[in-house]
Amino acid sequence: MKDLVQQLERAFWRHLPKNVATQVLTGDQKPVSFDGVTFATVESADKAVFDGYRPALIMVDETHHVAEEGTFKRLLDACEQLPQFGVTATPWRGDHFDISTHFGEPSYKMGIAEGMAKGYLAQVDYQVFVDNINWEAVREASKEGYTLKELNSKLFLPQRDEAILEMLWEAWSRTVQPRAILFCRTIKHAETIADLLARYSNSWSNATCLHTAMGKRERELALSAFRSGRIPILTAVDILNEGVDVPDVNIIGFLRVTHSRRIFVQQLGRGLRIKEGLKERVHVLDFVTDIRRLAAIVNFRRELEVARAPIETLMLDSAARISFSDENVGGIMEAWLKDAANVETAMDEAKLQFPEVS
């Protein structure tokens, strides 16, 4: 995307010597020279290579977009004799294609939990709202052996939007200079929530829904107003998953569920940027409606405990926290999801058998 190319060029300026030229190559911008570092959309880079250009080194940002076929694959195959490497925070693909088949095994890896423990990412105050659990379904699950699809349809009762707004207001009221992104189920749901927010409080009167049906200029203006603080809250579905760099975001709300680990991590990542002196922590409000999301959260909590182990004796106040609105549910989920990683990545048809719960 053109916006991300320009953003990446600006981000690199402070890392490059002043005598190294940079330029952008997109459908709208054609540099007079390829000296130094060229930042390009994949389509424009593919055309330049087709016309004979050969760079000395190729870096692919958001490498999870490299698939078994497609423009990235064609471009990289055409330059297979040249050094290539990729970077991504989310190496998983929905089609299960393994990007290491092209790039090889990762030369460096760092998980979110480790990044928090080392101070590269904002600490997380993660609240899981599980007040909508159907306890009869919990008891039945240990006897029936439901599939994931059946379990999700029976386990969770609908959350009221009004209750969600109350929880959000509580987090908003105790956050310094709050700025929030709420991820919703559909565009219609995102529009509804933005409207409810605007009517709930004067502080949210400019709450805005950002979606793909908006024109590019309209989206750019809304994002600019959000970055400057004129818009306090954005509601969206998937449009903010990648490349939107707003370190001020200190509240993330999940009003939807996704079965994709990549999308979950991308959306969580919108709040993980640190802003020195102004933001060290992000508040996450997760209104869970899926057993796989609970598995992802249980996994996340376990990873945080492992990553934090070396500094646990210090009892740092800044340590990340994951809490359930009902800690009884948290304990039960820990017992239920012994192999949470397998549940998190399981298909709808997978049949699960859980231990009996009194």
Image (tube, rainbow, N blue to C red):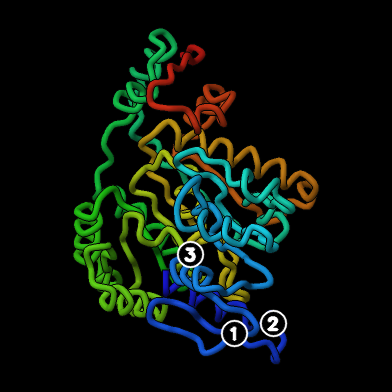
Q: Nearer the viewer, residue 49 or 278?
A: 49
Q: Quadrant where the N terminus lies?
A: bottom left
Does residue 296 appear to the left or right of 350 in the view shown?
A: right
Q: In what element is the residue under mark 1? A: strand
Disc 1 to disc 2, C-alpha distance: 9 Å
Q: Nearer the viewer, residue 234 or 84?
A: 84
> What residue does disc 3 label?
250
Q: In what element is the residue under mark 3? A: loop
Q: Which mark is residue 16?
A: 2
Amino acid type, label 3: Asn
Does residue 84 appear to the left or right of 249 in the view shown?
A: right
Disc 1 to disc 3, C-alpha distance: 32 Å
Does residue 248 appear in this view?
A: no
For the point 39% across and 77% down, the residue is 27
Q: Position of residue 103 (x, y in %)?
A: 65, 51
Amino acid type, label 2: Leu
Q: In what element is the residue under mark 2? A: loop
Does residue 9 appear in this view?
A: yes
> Quick check: marks 1 and 2 in contact, CB under 8 Å?
yes
For the point 50% across and 38% down, the residue is 96
Amino acid type, label 1: Thr
**Are there few (<14), some (14-19), or many (20+) residues within 10 Å of tag 2?**
few
Question: Which is nearer the N-term, disc 1 or disc 2?
Answer: 2
> What residue does disc 1 label?
22
